[in-house]
Amino acid sequence: MRLEQLQETIEVPKAVRDFEPEWGIVLGSGLAGVVDEVDAILHLPYEEIRGLPRSSAPGHPGRFIFGRLAGQRVMVAQGRAHLYEGHSADDVTAAVRFMSSLGAQKLVLTNAAGSLNPAFPPGSWMILSDHLNLTGTSPLLGTPDFVDMTDAYSAKLRERFHEIAGWTSILLHEGVYAGVLGPQYETPAEVRMLRTLGADAVGMSTVLEAIQARALGLELVGLSCLTNWGAGMRRETKLDHDDVLETGRRASGQLAALLIRALQEA
């Protein structure tokens, strides 16, 4: 569904249409607690919005929160839909088009990811400098949208987040995110392949949303909560989604601190 179609089919309360968010924020697995810092005026479940898919993944409540964070008007997507749930690339990027249709100009994409870089331990954060789209699809299929992805992730926003991380003593790495289909975790051989390709972290979201955001002209920043080592990097480590969610919950406070300072400096 293209942006124009989405604008025609989605029916939202007038308070939302008039809200005009300055920032859109998408929260990944286990990171939903950030909404506690938002001075909310409205909660809007995804199922109440025609054209948006529901999320069935644990740790993704599936609703928008409209309100203010650090004095800025924000629209927070508390959870996302994924390709591995059976959705199309068009489906999983509908929330980004919805944010853009309401006026958002800046977008923060967050996710839980496995670390592939021995210098990036679980429990720390990585800001995305670039990505590898290994999902085998694109939200731009069926269109002649030849979008330049050279500077997909805003250098200006990356610099701002690095400064804030330094002020707040938050460990923030920078690297390349590999987006894969899932839902299974990667094998040790696949982890070795991804590291050879130049990836520092791997996850099952974000890359398609980033493509859609750039096609719409949004200024973009991506943040990965590194929740676990990639398979085979630590022989004793077994991957479990409950551990991913728990690490995300513990890291939510750091994400909130980064976002609050970033929006204050906007």
Image (cartoon, rainbow, N blue to C red):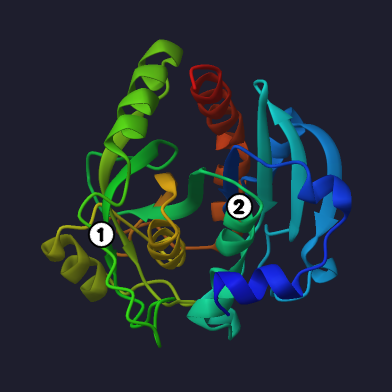
> On the image, numbered disc 2 is attached to which residue?
245
Q: Quadrant of residue 33?
A: top right
Q: In the image shown, does 94 or 86 lie closer to the viewer?
A: 94
* Proximity of marks 1 and 2: CB atoms separated by less than 8 Å: no
Residue sitting at x 35%, y 18%: 163
Answer above or below: position of 213 versus 1: above
Residue 143: image x %, image y %?
38, 83
Q: Please indicate whether residue 262 sits to the left or right of residue 9 in the image.
A: left
In which quadrant will I find the N terminus?
bottom right
Secondary structure at numbered mark 2: helix
Answer above or below: position of 155 versus 32: above
> On the image, numbered disc 1 is attached to which residue?
149
Work out how far the residue at label 1 is from the one at label 2, CA to CA, in angstroms: 30 Å
Q: Is residue 56 visible?
A: no
Would you call the spot at circle 2 few (<14 residues within 10 Å), some (14-19), or many (20 or more)? some
Residue 161: image x %, image y %?
39, 27
Answer above or below: position of 215 versus 165: below
